[in-house]
Amino acid sequence: MAGNSFGKAFKITTFGESHGKGIGAVIDGCPSGIPLCEEDFAEDMARRRPGRTPLDTPRSETDGVEILSGVFEGLTTGTPIALFIRNQDVKSEPYEILRTLFRPGHADYAYYKKYGHFDFRGGGRSSARETAARVAAGVVAQKILAPLEIQITAYTLEMGGIRAEHIDFDAIHENPFYCPDMAVVGKMKEVLSRAREAGDSIGGIVEVRTTGCPAGLGEPVFDKLSADLAKGVMSVGAVKGVEIGAGFESAKRKGSQNNDPITPAGFKTNHAGGILGGISNGNDIILRAAVKPIPSIMIEQETIDREGSPARLKLEGRFDASAVPRAVPVLKAMVAIVVADHYLRFKSIS
Amino acid sequence: MAGNSFGKAFKITTFGESHGKGIGAVIDGCPSGIPLCEEDFAEDMARRRPGRTPLDTPRSETDGVEILSGVFEGLTTGTPIALFIRNQDVKSEPYEILRTLFRPGHADYAYYKKYGHFDFRGGGRSSARETAARVAAGVVAQKILAPLEIQITAYTLEMGGIRAEHIDFDAIHENPFYCPDMAVVGKMKEVLSRAREAGDSIGGIVEVRTTGCPAGLGEPVFDKLSADLAKGVMSVGAVKGVEIGAGFESAKRKGSQNNDPITPAGFKTNHAGGILGGISNGNDIILRAAVKPIPSIMIEQETIDREGSPARLKLEGRFDASAVPRAVPVLKAMVAIVVADHYLRFKSIS
Amino acid sequence: MAGNSFGKAFKITTFGESHGKGIGAVIDGCPSGIPLCEEDFAEDMARRRPGRTPLDTPRSETDGVEILSGVFEGLTTGTPIALFIRNQDVKSEPYEILRTLFRPGHADYAYYKKYGHFDFRGGGRSSARETAARVAAGVVAQKILAPLEIQITAYTLEMGGIRAEHIDFDAIHENPFYCPDMAVVGKMKEVLSRAREAGDSIGGIVEVRTTGCPAGLGEPVFDKLSADLAKGVMSVGAVKGVEIGAGFESAKRKGSQNNDPITPAGFKTNHAGGILGGISNGNDIILRAAVKPIPSIMIEQETIDREGSPARLKLEGRFDASAVPRAVPVLKAMVAIVVADHYLRFKSIS
Amino acid sequence: MAGNSFGKAFKITTFGESHGKGIGAVIDGCPSGIPLCEEDFAEDMARRRPGRTPLDTPRSETDGVEILSGVFEGLTTGTPIALFIRNQDVKSEPYEILRTLFRPGHADYAYYKKYGHFDFRGGGRSSARETAARVAAGVVAQKILAPLEIQITAYTLEMGGIRAEHIDFDAIHENPFYCPDMAVVGKMKEVLSRAREAGDSIGGIVEVRTTGCPAGLGEPVFDKLSADLAKGVMSVGAVKGVEIGAGFESAKRKGSQNNDPITPAGFKTNHAGGILGGISNGNDIILRAAVKPIPSIMIEQETIDREGSPARLKLEGRFDASAVPRAVPVLKAMVAIVVADHYLRFKSIS
């Protein structure tokens, strides 16, 4: 049953597969009068693209976003904005082996059980390529938020066990890992290189901060801002955990440590991560997502074929040793989409 | 804008406040022909109720669930099942101070900013009492799942920093903390007592396991089973983090460690927590939620009043030193609701 | 699958059966700060109640609406408003015959085919009693619209073939049929009496006018104001047709006759019924609904039993010779609900 | 707020404008394993296309449907099916006058009031061209229904006051008006020619019959099959009225005339139009829609400009004297979409 739409006031519907014609999104609910052109997408799309660094596998897409509808004379019209990113580098031969074998850690087995028939090339719909549509939609969300001075910043907090110790927003785009602490970039590179040489992959943690968000966003008790953020972020394939503010750390704390004292000048601390009772409180919204190591590794693995017989699988070809840096723009986009959706929902009652 | 419904095929809508007439849920989409009576709710409702243990604050509700509609001659009819739990112990005098002061860590400030006018008594709609409706709805969800041999089990994995080292399902209901490891129950009790004596509170981690779930549940790319679980669980007031399978631990792993090898007899490990590509893979579904320490503490705190002036607040009266045990049946209910919803959604296409 | 909710920003979920404990509605999305008390419901509920006129079958419900949640100190809080109307006059013995026989023109046969198990007493969920919840929800919708000077007026345009020739709003509540033309009330009464004596029933047409609605409501291309009005109105059991503005008459017209010329002072005519391209244009919104004759007649009819064997059915007991007058407040409520929903949706983008 | 999606289990989202890059639909919820190729769309798309008959204005689109996603090796995969129909004949110069003037009977005025900024060329999003996406989506819906032997047939019941007296399915595609009665085709042609010569347009009535639909489809009380059909049909721009079965005629009937007697062999009559209590009863589902005369006429009309000053408008260029024949495949598509959606929703509970 239909599950490819997200959001209620700012609603996105995505489509497309890794090795089909392309990837796209339809955005429904974007207000009219917002300036939007195809160049607006370039920066965020480039950040998501593989092949950015010498450590990445090259995939030659330029990932230009074509606006198919919803914009007239440079401004949105309030009607659906359809975005399309054509696939360009789609050799499917390397994937013939996946016609019979399931890749461990990937969606193949589950897709086969659910759909019977599925596009196995490069993961098809379950490929990380699907997130290109999310990044594109996130650009539009940020176009709504920017004039309100609501700003979303995302970065690699941790990769391969190496954690940023300081958060310097200026550093983020000074290194290929989107790490906010230049002091640990070298170590991250080393860990990544080592994994890569071993044909292995590493995971990490992405943090997303939303600044400038007014108090009042979020619709209890189910469409809490925190709940929709959790859904949006957990719906990204590589994510296996999400936490807000102190998150799992708060499980170890006392109430007297975890509560944020309120003063006339604002909250003294921000263990709540900017959300109380599911509603933004005006503080920065802080969210972290656990990104698992990419399951595609160049090491031989145990698996079965469609008939259930045992098999060995050793993947070859394209290879990223970590999804973490590429997840940064994707998670930024998802947070932007949720915040824009809730901003428009909030407006309807205020 | 409307945010009090959850689920698409098995859809619940809840209502009610802590100190209003009561708390309720309307369940829409429950198939017809399922046996259901008011006694069915007693067990799970009792587990959620405060005042179960000598350590809890007594609140004298028996929390009987009244079925207002949708059941005829002992069987569901496929029409909406309305459930109502009348509030009985609703002295509102102790809450008069909240007419002006915001409790740190609670929703008061955010509700005031969003709604202007809100029921401040005991947290009103943002009270943990709201979860009574979730537990009731979860009972109906489990009535759908039980004949399919899909079983949900929840327990306190960690409280106040004390973590269960073994998972023994039989132990769970042998102790008031729903801890699956009797060996650590004593320590949990000690930590809780100490916090209580200090007027403080402690957090913890609840784990929920779903066994017997067939492969195929979950609707990518947004209504992934993992994404809806994350939303359902994060929508519970006290929860600040959620993870599936290896979760945040997977951020530190290599792909070769994190992938679950597939054999003719099934998956060799379950780091994926039973979900691949957002779809159940037939393995146990494993989820953990971080529960923050209850913000209501008996220690004086810094806050402001509605005019923004500084104030000191020292709460008195009812007091639970931890929400963790009570969160166990609530999170079990939320998982049951998500799984039932996805089971019915799955059926529509198979 | 869940189908008992309606609306997106102002969302209602109804529950309850004719001979169960009662009928209710949960309203989600009502803004905070709106004055609301139980007395507010009395007038519209009384208009829907059977037994208003000497011609009606008495059913002794007073149909008091109990507010279960969402109102605090006389004002809505922005949280769900649960409304409950307890059934009082619910003798179920007369309905035992329906355990086996299907009433022609009623939902019995379809419910049996769909649900297998259903509450057959008085039609259960398919009873016109279900509309009590709609009327109650409509009162809340009107509470939102009234300060905006958006006014909904409904009346019996035609009954038993007798049609009002003039529309005088003042006349509507001067007669038990809610007919806006006192000159034809006598004839309506005569036709109704004759049908009643024959044990038969008559249908009619209800017209609903919304005045004061600003231009801009409606969300093309599917959630057009006209489309949502059509759905809301057609979802009322007795309704078999709906038209907007010139409606079916426009099928016989030329474009030059049907277009409404636009002048600086507004539209010269209103064949569009206040809606262009699915969006309100500032003109009065005019809608008509065809209400079928009540299928419960005291004349023997041909039917079958649950096993498919032929049978004869002659109903006895309660009897209304026409649903038309009682449909008037119900259709007013549905239009109010749709307009309130679209008003709140419109606000989110403006 | 987002209003461009329709359906819950079989959900379509459409996008595109008359004079933008093209028109498209994303279908979410189509089961996997259904054969689908681009040729499948040709027949229905051709039927919707203008320029089919010598009486129509030529618009040279071939309206080929491109499948952008969701199909692999000739079969649907259960993932979103994106369809795109590129606009080819999009001279926008003739529309420059609409930058300032509102066309009476069109959406221009309402769009301006709602969105401020809108694509006025050929009506933009409010153009009948938008229905191309509906027809394409309807083809997919019919692919689901055909193997179940659920068949949708649509035809012109009335045009310009000329009504078919017999319904002969074989005749429908033997004439350019999709009239099921060859005996009145000549008169229809005459009326249409006369209107055309006068620069005027005519309306009509389209009837849609669904045969082979099993009992049980429809989700009371709001998502009744009848209610969703009404919404789907009324969401088509040119439609101003919709009725099911006896429809408005039932308003004039007695219950004894309108009820359909039930016999072991089925219903004796079908005044209910195949729907009882909002649920299909196994009989043919019969629906009629009133299609207004196209507002674009070549006769000078009174209007205003964006500043509110009076103006005269005489349209030139493209011109269809009636939308009725082209509405036939559109309304067939909408009925197919609703029935497919409800078929999948029904399956989830049975």
Image (tube, coloured by chain):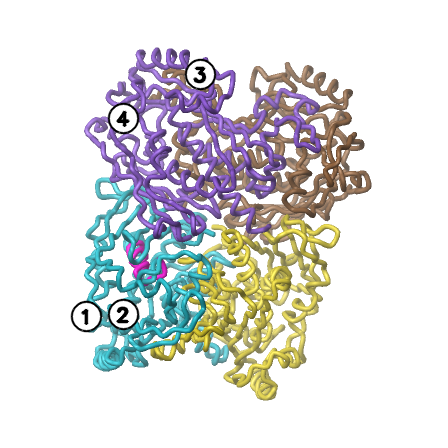
Chain colours: A cyan, B yellow, C brown, D purple
Count all numbered tags in the image, as a single digit. 4
In which image quadrant can residue D312 be found?
Answer: top left
In terms of secondary structure, where does tag 3 sit?
helix
Q: Which residues are magenta?
A: A125-137
Question: Mark number for residue D101?
Answer: 4
How far from the left and from the top, in percent, is residue B193? 60, 85
Quadrant in the picture for the N terminus of chain D: top left
Give, as a three-letter code, the residue at label 3.
Met
| Chain identity of mark 2 | A
Q: Which residue is mark 1?
A: A53
Q: Is residue C35 visible?
A: no
Alpha-carbon distance for marks 1 and 3?
70 Å
Earlier residue among tags 2 and 1: 1
Asked if both marks, 1 and 3, belong to the same chain, the answer given is no
Image position of B305 with respect to A341: above or below: below
Is A131 one of the magenta-colored residues?
A: yes
In screen coordinates, is C112 left or right of A330? right
User: Contact, CB < 8 Å: mark 3 with mark 4?
Assistant: no
Given residues C74 and C196, the one toward you in this image is C196
| Distance CA(mark 2)–CA(mark 1) | 10 Å
Does the rendering let one see residue C275? yes
